């Protein structure tokens, strides 16, 4: 169940009167979100995921995430539990592939793929590309708990493959951090609600500036209400990575 004190922090209060953001300012707000989270070089993160499902034992995963944002390349490699070790995902040429060493074959997956069967999607651990994938519309300024926020509706651009065709964001006016997200199906049905209570920044030498990332993410399945996933980013390393890492051969070699 959702922790009462955690939900109280994000309780939606009555909207405050505010001048609307014009379309140009709204677009800039979303571009700024992307820019703050973008690293021009490589990225390595150790990630902890804890998945809860109704009538099932909680599952804990450790994985390492490798990114080369400039080329939109991505690798997820599972380390724990032992039953999942060696499994992984590879994103290359805008295609997402899954590898299972037990059967020794690759399968192409969609953006709706649940990473490791959790409520996490590829985009949750990848570079933010909201301005490229969606058009933005300002819906209002209001309070989210103690935070003054912009509420923005995103609609997927034509021809772009995304996990959810429409997304609603609550963006902290003071910091520019996304605090809450709702993701909807094409019908408008709410599919997932996400919270981002903790953000951190790290200095990037390749970017010559700071890179922001959500240190804690909480995902709640709005269809299967008992299902939820906690994601913690335990460490970040922005040193250059071996180019051969972003290949099927490299991921296959990690399970031998």
Image (spheres, rainbow, N blue to C red):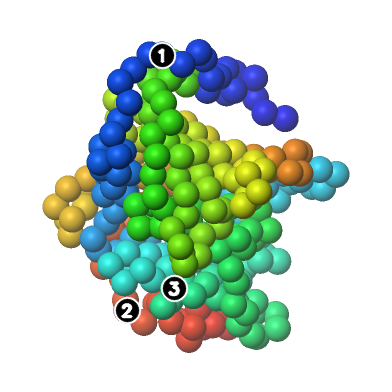
> Within the image, what quadrant is residue 140 found in?
top left
Residue annotated with mark 3? 94
The correct choice, above or below, for 22 with respect to 75 in the image is above
Q: Foreground residue, 256 or 199? A: 199
Mark 2 crowdedness (10 Å alpha carbons): few <14, some 14-19, many ≥20: few
Q: Position of residue 3 (x, y in %)?
A: 65, 25
Judging depth in this view, the residue of 232 and 111 nearest the camera is 111
Residue 20, quarter of the rendered image = top left
Q: Disc 3 on helix, strand or loop?
A: loop
Which residue shows up at 25% across the image and 63% down it? 41
Q: Nearer the viewer, mark 1 or mark 2?
A: 1
Disc marking residue 243: 2
Q: CA distance from mark 3 to mark 1?
A: 41 Å
* Mark before the other along the chain sequence, 1 or 2: 1
Residues under labels 2 and 3: Cα distance?
A: 17 Å
Is 19 displayed left or right of 155 in the figure? left
Q: Is 36 on the left-hand or right-hand side of 219?
A: left
- Residues at discs 2 and 3 in contact (Cβ within 8 Å): no
In the rendered structure, which disc, 3 or 1, sits on the residue that comes first in sequence? 1
Residue highlighted by disc 1: 16
């Amino acid at each position: 169940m959702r922790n009462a004190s955690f939900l109280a922090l994000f309780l939606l209060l009555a909207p405050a009167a505010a001048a609307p953001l014009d379309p140009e300012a709204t677009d800039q707000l979303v571009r700024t979100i992307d820019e703050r989270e973008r690293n021009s070089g490589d990225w390595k993160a150790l990630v902890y995921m804890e998945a809860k499902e109704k009538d099932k034992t909680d599952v804990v995963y450790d994985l390492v995430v490798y990114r080369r944002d400039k080329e939109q390349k991505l690798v997820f490699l599972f380390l724990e539990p032992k039953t999942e070790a060696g499994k992984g995902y590879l994103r290359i040429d805008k295609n997402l592939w899954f590898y299972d060493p037990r059967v020794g074959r690759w399968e192409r997956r969609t953006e709706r793929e649940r990473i490791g069967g959790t409520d996490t999607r590829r985009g949750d651990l990848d570079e933010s590309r909201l301005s490229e994938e969606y058009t933005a519309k300002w819906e209002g300024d209001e309070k989210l708990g103690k935070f003054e926020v912009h509420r923005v509706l995103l609609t997927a651009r034509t021809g772009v493959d995304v996990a959810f065709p429409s997304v609603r964001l609550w963006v902290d006016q003071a910091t520019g951090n996304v605090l809450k997200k709702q993701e909807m199906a094409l019908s408008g049905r709410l599919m997932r609600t996400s919270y981002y209570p903790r953000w951190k920044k790290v200095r990037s030498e390749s970017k010559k500036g700071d890179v922001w990332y959500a240190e804690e993410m909480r995902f709640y399945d709005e269809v299967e209400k008992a299902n939820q996933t906690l994601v913690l980013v335990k460490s970040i390393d922005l040193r250059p990575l071996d180019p051969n890492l972003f290949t099927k051969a490299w991921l296959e070699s990690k399970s031998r």
